[in-house]
Image (cartoon, rainbow, N blue to C red):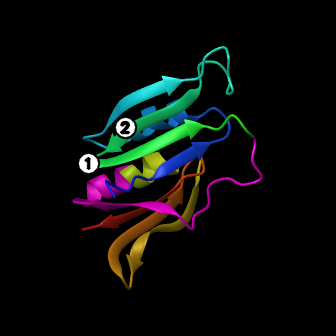
Amino acid sequence: MKKVTPFLMFQDGNAEEAMKFYTSVIDGSEIRSVTRYGAEGPGKEGTVMQAVFSLKDQEIMCIDSPTPHDFDFTPSFSLFITCETMAELERLFEKLGENGEALMPLDHYGFSQKFGWVVDRYGVSWQLNLE
């Protein structure tokens, strides 16, 4: 086995927008490659056929699905971020939660001094924890 990479499948043509958003709010992140569907399909021309981006050192792949599915993202799979400072935790909770939903508000929980869980505007789930 070479490596394990999380893979996000977007259904509404939001892959590129989501990557740009994630890499803009998480320091040390970048879009590494984007391959787009052409006029021949099977996806809508210009949407993401396959892309790779990194959040810190974690590489993530994504696509815009050319096929509609009866499923979408679920909080049972989430990206977990350990923040070094309270300011970083609060900023990420606010930014990732914009137009999304807080599943667990920032608070002291038995397992963490400060923790929050949000689903972002694209349906991706994020657990944010203070180191």
Please state which amino acid type lies under the numbered disc 2.
Thr
Q: Callout 2: few (<14), some (14-19), or many (20+) C-alpha neighbours within 10 Å?
A: some
| Element marked by disc 2 | helix
Q: Mark 2 points at which residue?
A: 23
Q: Where is residue 50 in the image (x, y as percent from the top left)?
A: 50, 33
| Element marked by disc 1 | loop
Q: Mark 1 points at which residue?
A: 57
Please state which amino acid type lies under the numbered disc 1.
Asp
Q: Is residue 90 above or below residue 53?
A: below
Q: Quadrant of the N terminus?
A: bottom left
Which of 99 and 65 lies nearest the eye of the viewer?
65
Q: Where is residue 92 in the image (x, y as percent from the top left)?
A: 38, 51
Residue sitting farthest toward the bottom: 110
Q: Quadrant of the C terminus?
A: bottom left
For the magenta stretch, what is the residue range? 68-91
Q: Is residue 48 above or below residue 123?
A: above
Q: Would residue 20 be found to the left or right of residue 63 on screen?
A: left
Query: Would residue 4 be seen by someone viewing this image from the given angle?
Result: yes
Q: Residue at x 36, y 56 (%)?
A: 90
Q: Which residue is drawn at 39% across and 29% down?
A: 33
Which of 78 and 33 lies nearest the eye of the viewer?
33
Q: Which of marks 1 and 2 is nearer the N terminus?
A: 2
Cα separation, mark 1 vs mark 2, equals 12 Å
